[in-house]
Amino acid sequence: MVIGGLDIGSRTIKFVLLEDKTLKDYIILDTGVDPLDKIKKILANYNCEQVIATGYGRYLIQKTLGFPIVSEIKAHAQGACFFCPNCRTVIDIGGQDSKVIRVRNKRVENFEMNDRCAAGTGRFLEVMATTLGFSIDDFSKYALQAKNSINLNSMCTVFAESEVISLITQGEDVCNIALGIHNAIVNRIWAMIVKAGYEDDIVFTGGVAKNQCIVHLLRERLNKNIYIPEEPQIIGALGAGLSLIS
């Protein structure tokens, strides 16, 4: 069976093509202002027998195209277990939300989710990187070069941006500020990890899993190895597709 899995996020659309349980292809592109048009163009290039959607935009796809949907929590848990069969904990940091999922026997046991604001998410990182004059790809590299970490008083994106600008004008080292921002995100995730609980094996998914400074700080805090999929952004779409097969 050829399955299409869609994860329509606030920042990006992820599509995977599964043939039985084998990943045959995937696409990642910006969500933009007309995600439905982009999804129709993606699907026109594939001969999917069934398509399923997850993510923020899943209800739009269900309403307009009639495809079944699955929750992001279940999709990420299934996708992480496909990548790492012994997975017990999933940490996912996406564009506009973050979540920690406890898994047992490949089923969701408990979870914590932050979807009320951009604090501690990829969008927060993007805004702070721009404020400091870094590209998002270079942001973590400079943070890892810091000699000290400067504490931020606010995780609100608007207030934190003002605070960062103030620190720059005070002559603080931008690498130290960058590390402080990364530590602030890890502190926020850590609170969710403690609340949800965690056990080995731990899988880190979402676009922020590509940030080496966040990965380094999480490994230090957990004192455990963290598994990163080759393409951590597609795990939700992959799990959605797998949920149809299982």
Image (cartoon, rainbow, N blue to C red):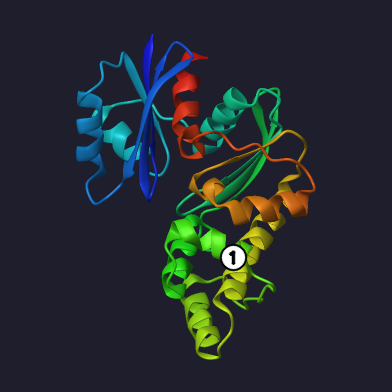
Q: Residue furthest front?
A: 145
Residue at 52 percent of width and 57 percent of height: 121
144 lies above or below 219: below
Along the line of sight, which residue is nearer the eye, 150 or 46?
150
Instruction: Tell me residue 46's x, y (percent).
Output: 26, 20
Q: Residue furthest bottom?
A: 170
Pointer 1 residue? 143
Residue at 32 percent of width and 26 percent of height: 67
Instruction: Tell me residue 156's x, y (percent).
Output: 52, 71
Asked if one can make out residue 120 in the rendered structure from this viewpoint, the answer is no
| Quadrant assignment, res 197 | top right
Instruction: Tell me residue 5's x, y (percent).
Output: 39, 26
Q: Is residue 174 left or right of residue 68?
A: right
- How busy is the neighbourhood of tag 1: few (under 14 within 10 Å), some, or many (20 plus)? many
Residue at 60 percent of width and 38 percent of height: 228
Residue at 58 percent of width and 80 percent of height: 173
